[in-house]
Every structure is written in structure tokens, then in C-alpha cells.
Amino acid sequence: VQLQAYGGGLVQPGGSLRLSCAPSGTVFVITTYAWYRQAPGKQRELVASMTRDGSTNYADSVKGRFTISRDNIKESVDLEMNDLKPEDTAVYYCNADRLYVHYSAYERWEYDYWGQGTLVTVSS
């Protein structure tokens, strides 16, 4: 099972992008989904998170501009990013803290999955 993130790209300041992330295999439950980002020369930081029951948490720098949402049937998560700024430029990663995964011979809880990262560049 892998998390697959996509949707990054080049956008002008003030523009919008939507990132998406979903598992490649059969996953029945993901508890908390989160988006992180890492800009060049900086540490990875939490952008937004959402629990299975809908509780959300946002970094102060993105409040009012970014919205996290999830589909508990598809076990996917999106990040809608509006009014993008050059300082939003980073590689964005999705994270799932706890997953209940189905394999052919068994099922089990697994922990701390990361997507491969998708680059968002905000520039004119």
C-alpha cells in the first residue's frame, strides 16, 4: 500500500490549486490525514490535518486560504489552496497516521504512511 499525492504545479500569486491524496491498495480506515510541506532549506511543517470525525487543524499561515477535506468512503484527502503566495512554494506531502490495511492473506493496522510529495511553485 502506498499513498499517492498529486495536483501540484506552477501557479501565479493569488491563484488556486487542489492537491489530492489516496492509498493505492485496499484501506478500510484512515484515522487522521494531514498535509505537510517542506520549502527549500526549511524543515517540514504541518499545513493542515483532519480527523476521521471531521476535526481540523491549520497552520496560522494558511488559515482562511486553505481547506482540507476528506472522503471516508474512498479514504482520500484533498487540500484546496486559494490565494496562493510565493511563500507557499514547497513540496507538499500527505500523511496518514494510522491505517487499517487489507492484504490478500490478512488485515492489520499500519502506521505513519507518507505520500511521495508533490511540488507547488507559486511564482509570476
Image (spheres, rainbow, N blue to C red):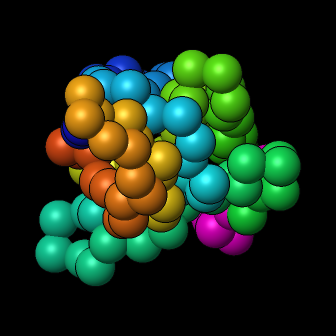
- Image quadrant containing the N terminus: top left
Q: Residue at x 57, y 20 (%)?
A: 74
The residue that appears at 26% across and 63% down in the rendered structure is 39
Q: Which residues are magenta?
A: 58-64
Q: Nearer the viewer, residue 120 or 84?
A: 120
Residue 73 placement, left or right of 15: right
Q: Farthest bottom residue?
A: 43
Whole-percent x and y of residue 20?
45, 27
Q: Quadrant of residue 37?
A: bottom left
Q: Residue furthest front?
A: 105
Q: Is residue 85 above or below residue 48?
A: above
Q: Is residue 59 magenta?
A: yes
The image shows residue 68, relative to residue 20, as above or below, that is below
Taking the image as drawn, is residue 93 in sight? yes
Q: Is residue 20 magenta?
A: no
Task: Relative to 114, say whether 105 is above or below.
Answer: above
Q: Quadrant of the C terminus?
A: top left
Q: Position of residue 103 (x, y in %)?
A: 28, 34
Q: Tally the numbered discs.
A: 0
Please state the horizontal and vertical placement of residue 116, each as a whole percent of the image: 19, 43
| Quarter of the view holding residue 59 | bottom right
Residue lying at 54% horizontally and 34% vertically, measured from the top left: 28
Residue found at x 43% / y 58%: 109
Asked if residue 13 is positioned above or below residue 35 in the image, the reply reads: above
